Amino acid sequence: MYAIAIHGGALTMKPGELSEEEAAFQRVGLGKALHAGWLILNRGGTALDAVEAAVRSLEDNPHFNAGRGSSLTRQGEAEMDAAIMDGRTLQAGAVTGVRYVQHPIGLARAVLERSPHAFLAGDGALEFALACGLPLAAPSYFQTDKTRQQWLALAQQESNQLAGHDTVGAVALDQAGNLAVATSTGGIEGQAKGRVGDSPVLGGGTYASNDSCAVSCTGDGEVILRGALAHEVCALVKYQGLPLAEACQAALRLHDDKLKGDKGFIALDPQGRVAIEFNTNVMRRAYRVGEAAPYIAIYQDE
């Protein structure tokens, strides 16, 4: 048994806000990323390699808020976050406030494998990327027409209003029975310099353990972070024995009066059961279990 699930962000959108053309690009991107991870699993590769490959594909795609398509800070810069975790060993690598690194998830993987630390930030993360010889890109690489227009619109408003909170992520189960998770994001459009969301925080937006499940979150990062929702899902599975989908639904409802906002989860357990739960009308998502046909969807009613 092997399986992979991915997401490209969850958010509430007005009808017609997502154009048919953009939705089509996103479906193609989800399909490519899913296949990149599935192919590794199909050939007997590790869950860790599969989630990294899937997220790398999404980081290369300007239609998703990670890597090349990252949102821009108030200063017009891309500051990226990423995390990856091995459910077999509980080893993990996380980075935040990353600039210039073409694949933040690759940097997170390098932290997992080559650093005595689990989490690096800012200039320290960049220096580590340089020491590891990871590919870098000029600031212009991360400034697409779409993100520049969004940044200009926010700048002209001269307000503290923030927009968008997309993330990309993947969870996988390999043929050896091991789980892994990877999450990457460009943050929020117009976010303050140095802002950290849930994606790179282990237990916040990213967590995996073979004794429960692997979870990647998307939505309002501050809300997910305050609820430690990725770990909440794993804890509900491990300690209360809830089925995976029920655990995700319970985490969505956790402190609903205090944790109001967009939330979405993809999760996978050691039996290859996939759960995708969200409270938004848009959740870019895809999964494939073994040789079964892939499932790809964007809207709530699909």
Image: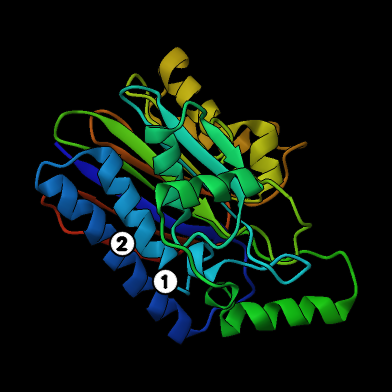
Residue 255 at x, y percent in the picture: 70, 31
Residue 234 at x, y percent in the picture: 46, 25
21 to the left or right of 230 = left
Q: Residue at x 32, y 47 (%)?
A: 51
Tell me the tag on residue 17: none
Label 2 and label 1: CA atoms lie apart by 9 Å
**Which residue, given by chain and number where applicable, does mark 1 sit on?**
61
Q: How crowded is mark 2: few (under 14 residues within 10 Å), some or many (20 or more)?
A: many
Q: Can residue 266 be seen?
A: no
The quarter holding residue 75 reads bottom right
Residue 15 at x, y percent in the picture: 60, 77
Mark 2 lies on a secondary structure that is helix
Q: Residue at x 40, y 41 (%)?
A: 110
Q: Do the CB atoms of the residues marked 2 and 1 lie less than 8 Å apart?
A: yes
Residue 95 drawn above or below residue 241: below
Q: Which residue is drawn at 47% across and 26% down?
A: 116
278 to the left or right of 225 = left
Residue 143 at x, y percent in the picture: 59, 77
Label 2 or label 1, whichever comes before in sequence order? 2
**Which residue, given by chain and number where applicable, does mark 2 sit on?**
33
Question: How many labels were placed on the picture?
Answer: 2
Amino acid carrying label 2: it is: Ala
Specify the quadrant that holds the N terminus. top left
Q: Can residue 299 be seen?
A: yes
Amino acid carrying label 1: it is: Asn
Q: How crowded is mark 1: few (under 14 residues within 10 Å), some or many (20 or more)?
A: many
